[in-house]
Image: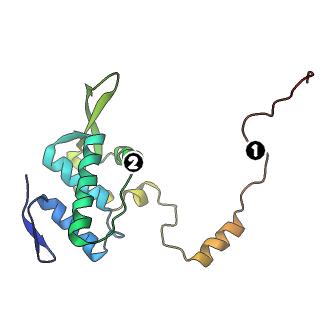
Amino acid sequence: MAGSGSIGGMVEKELRDFEIDIARSFKLGGYAVVSPTAMWVRGHLLDVNSDYVYGMWKRYVDFKKLVSERLMVTIRQDSYSSFRTFIYLLRKLRLVLFDREEKARGYFRKKYYRLNRRRINDPSWKRPFQTAYPVTDWKKKTPREIDKLRKKYPRSKGKRVGRPPKYFGGSL
């Protein structure tokens, strides 16, 4: 389960084999080309067969903390909500499939997901957002380009949506 390898000369015993490759991409700054989250989910589900979202998220957060400490690199931590949305995207792309449901504490249920064995080597794993939303312009924009887009698509200045004001006394 635990792999051994080196990242930048340091021996890693806590990282699994697939995690070492992902850690190297963080060190080289190559995570713009390949989604490290997707590659981690793929490797994790290959390793454990099935897991629930919260369990995956906790292990991924621990992995990112370990890599950021060892490489002395700042890595932004994903929230549970964004990770859950990401798993939903992978499910929408049919890269992961619903496996089973177990009762948890209270009325909550753990939904387990497994890897779609037919799509293990699918190119969608590298950039799932770009695969799901191909029309979107994904290139990084300069501040000047962002300003142009804001001028081209201004915010609507319609009525605010919310609670109507309270009227004291009298009828409407």
Residue at which label 1 appears: 160
Q: Considering the image in quadrants, where does the C terminus appear?
A: top right
- Mark 2, mark 1: which one is toward the viewer? 1
Secondary structure state at the residue bearing disc 1: loop
Q: Position of residue 26 (x, y in %)?
A: 27, 70
Q: CA distance from mark 2 to mark 1?
A: 31 Å
Q: Residue at x 14, y 59 (%)?
A: 15
Q: Earlier in the sequence, mark 2 or mark 1?
A: 2
Figure quadrant of residue 125:
bottom left
Q: Amino acid at mark 1?
A: Arg
Secondary structure state at the residue bearing disc 2: helix
Q: Residue at x 16, y 60 (%)?
A: 18
Q: Amino acid at mark 2?
A: Leu
Residue at which label 2 appears: 89
Q: Residue at x 26, y 46 (%)?
A: 56
Q: Position of residue 36 (x, y in %)?
A: 29, 61
* Whether residue 142 is visible: yes
In this orientation, which residue lies closer to the viewer: 10 or 19? 10
Q: Position of residue 155 (x, y in %)?
A: 71, 58
